[in-house]
Amino acid sequence: MAGHIQDRWFKTETNSDGKTVRVKSDRHGSGLRYRARYIGPDGTEKSKSFSDGKKRLAEKWLSAIETDMTRGQYVDPSAGKVTFKDFATAWLASQTTDPSTIVNMELRFRLHAFPYIGSRSMTAFQPTHIRTWARALMDSGMAASYQRTVFANVSAVFGAAVDDGIISRNPCRAGSVRAPKLDPRKIKPWTRDRVVAVRGGLPEHYATTVDLGAGCGLRQGEIFGLAVDEVDFDGGVLHIVRQVKLVGPQMVFAPPKGGKLRDVPLADVVSDALAAHITCQPPIDVTLPWKTPDGPPVTAKLLFYSRERRSMNRNYFNMYLWKPALIAGGVIPERMPGERFIPSREHGMHALRHYYASVLLDSGENIKALAEYLGHSDPGFTLRTLHTPDAEQQGPGTPGHRLSFRQGSVSRTLNAKGRRPCASRSGKSTADGPHTAQGSGNPL
């Protein structure tokens, strides 16, 4: 047996005859009697105390410790006394992933984990505690996808604790614990008419963001980070090399999601719309730190910027430009005075990418090529998450007709409202709505 059992109620002494005898100690009759002691793998002594009459239980505990050491499953009992909050905080500080990811995880822990399970010690967790917490997440009304993200972050903390030998099992992976389920329904993309309507609801100098989203499949941060020298008008290509993202309150330049640099076909109609936008709203130099708030400064001549001539803040854009455009397009209802906009996560600017992908799939585009254009590493992901539109949803005409957006052009809509779209460098009106690469007649 590893270690030994100390009886603290008795001690051994040598009497006058030179014999060793057991005599009562000063602690006799008070406190826990037996103390199981052993030397841990780190060379320090560990112990646990047991009451009178529990010597056999102490021996079993020591035997279990010896078995765990032999099997390589030993967990230091004292290490597990650290609370979930303290361990998760230390775990976050050791992460080397993207800074914005760390900031977002810290926010999720602070809002949705620490108030419920933060004060419990790591070794005290049972599956029932995780089931109760997961139910609280569900009852909070947050989206199922966000519940799943929070759950995965918490599970990662417990997984790290298992790796560090603090706990033996991850309670989030117990058989009786179920991770929040995602909505099984596939994303249903917008119709052409909805895209055009929302575009018409944006201020004129931001309307071209819709062309890039629905016509080239760019993410919001990639649109905000697009510089004029990354638009190849002659070659008909966009070079996607950066995005604008938030790390806490600080905006930074960073590589595209997943570090996946890519080239995206640029249709003639989108090219003309960009040329018109540049004529009306000349690009300016914007300097931001690279990747982290304390990163080296990087300057790019951005196509889209705020009225303060700074990089676009997604929070401002979404609240004060995109939401009103959704209302103007009939996507969400008008908010009442003093009330917030209704939740509309599925109608964010990302819906333009879904539209771009779905219409190209419906037109017979190669899924591998489409995944490259979208910056997806797995073409299967594109197919699993998107719902291919049918002709009834998209309106009359062939797929090529629906891609071209010639019907119901935004230029006529803008003129009907009294706006005059800027002329392109070729002298013709170009603000006739978002277009995809196939709408130009050039194959992707």
Image: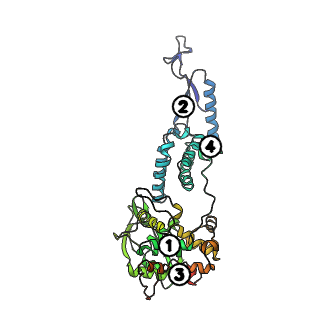
Give neighbour class at mark 1: few <14, some 14-19, many 20+ (Cα, 10 Å). many
The amino acid pointed to by label 4 is Gly
Above or below, 216 relative to 41: below
Q: Nearer the viewer, mark 3 or mark 4?
A: 3
CB within 8 Å, label 1 to label 2: no
Q: Amino acid at mark 1?
A: Ala
Where is mark 2, residue-wise? 47
What crowding class fits label 2: few (fewer than 14 Cα within 10 Å), some (14-19), or many (20 or more)?
A: some
Q: Which mark, by number, is residue 72?
A: 4
Q: Nearer the viewer, mark 1 or mark 2?
A: 1
Q: Which residue is mark 1?
A: 197
Q: Are marks 3 and 1 in contact (CB under 8 Å)?
A: no
Give percent across and percent down for residue 174: 63, 45
Q: CA distance from mark 2 to mark 3?
A: 72 Å
Q: Secondary structure at mark 1?
A: helix
Near-viewer residue (225 or 85): 225
45 sits to left or right of 279:
right
Query: Judging from the image, what secondary structure is the residue with disc 2 in?
Result: strand
Nearest the viewer among 431 and 278 is 431
Q: Amino acid at mark 2?
A: Ser
Does residue 64 appear left or right of residue 337 in this picture? Answer: right
The N terminus, quarter of image: top right
- First reached walking from the N terminus: tag 3 or tag 4: 4
